Amino acid sequence: MKRDPQPQHPSSGGKHPPGRQIEALPEKECAAAEDGPPKSPLWVFGYGSLVWRPDFEFTSRKVGYIRGYTRRFWQGDTFHRGSEKMPGRVVTLLEDYDGCTWGVAYELHGDQVAASLKYLNMREAVLGGYDTKLVKFYPQEEETDEPILALVYIATPQNPSYLGPASEEEIAAQILVSSGCSGHNIEYLLRLADFMRFCCPHVEDEHLFSIEEALISVLPCLCHAEEPFAKE
């Protein structure tokens, strides 16, 4: 599957604007991340399955990006999209000076905070191997440069399910044969690619789209649904 080159958004492409450095939170905010997530209202940033299937109650959602991180299919999954015998491949974030990762931030209020964090702790931390961090989120449709502080789940090389780098072809081959309690690993890849294509059409996610193309190249009969996943 080939795509026409997309124009880069002047403030939100795959790279930072000139002179931009990796986002660093003030010491007070970093301490808050270690002591626990901020109280209501709370924003949670998703860049993987959370962009289409949050499965928790929220007040509002915004498409946007965080700086200083690149999304990679480097995390193994033995529950949601794979098994112990055949781990799947899901995304995590890699610190990257020039990185920019697009996704969705969800705003939580009141009782939504505790309920959502309880659910996400099981889904992302206990079953997924992810840790939490506070990051600066920039909404797509707002022209202000003032970011929103958001909680994000990141899998690091220290967790036992971390698989690390591999070629796009190797990752696609692993995704092709993996399935877990939440569905097939192929669905995960295609839904994420469709989100980027329909919600962030100005962004070219080379890593994601290259894996998608590698997968489709060995499945010539594979077709997208008539209604894009991202619109569900």
Image (cartoon, rainbow, N blue to C red):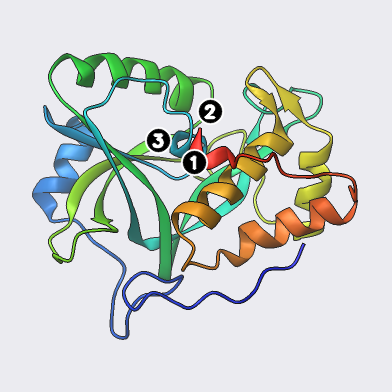
Circle 1 SS class: loop
Q: What amino acid is labelled 2 in the image?
A: Gly
Q: Please state if 58 lies on the left or on the right of 92 as rendered.
A: left
Asked which secondary structure carries label 2, the reply is loop
User: Which of the two residues, 34 or 61, is positioned nearer the viewer here?
Assistant: 61
The disc at residue 131 is: 3
Q: Are the two marked residues, 3 and 1, in contact with CB atoms closer than 8 angstroms?
A: yes
Q: Identify which residue is drawn at 58% across, 38% down.
A: 229
Which structural element holds mark 3?
A: strand
Report the quarter where the N terminus lies: bottom right
Q: Position of residue 154 (x, y in %)?
A: 43, 42
- Residue 79 to residue 157: above or below: above
**Which residue does the numbered mark 1 point to in the structure image?**
155
Q: Residue at x 58, y 48 (%)?
A: 194
Task: Determine the image quadrant of residue 10.
Answer: bottom left
The crowding category of the residue bearing disc 2, from other C-alpha atoms within 10 Å (few below 14, some 14 to 19, many at least 20), is many
Q: Position of residue 69 (x, y in %)?
A: 42, 60
Taking depth in this image into account, of 75 and 10 the one nearest to the observer is 10
* Left or right of 15, for residue 216: right
Q: Which residue is mark 2?
A: 128
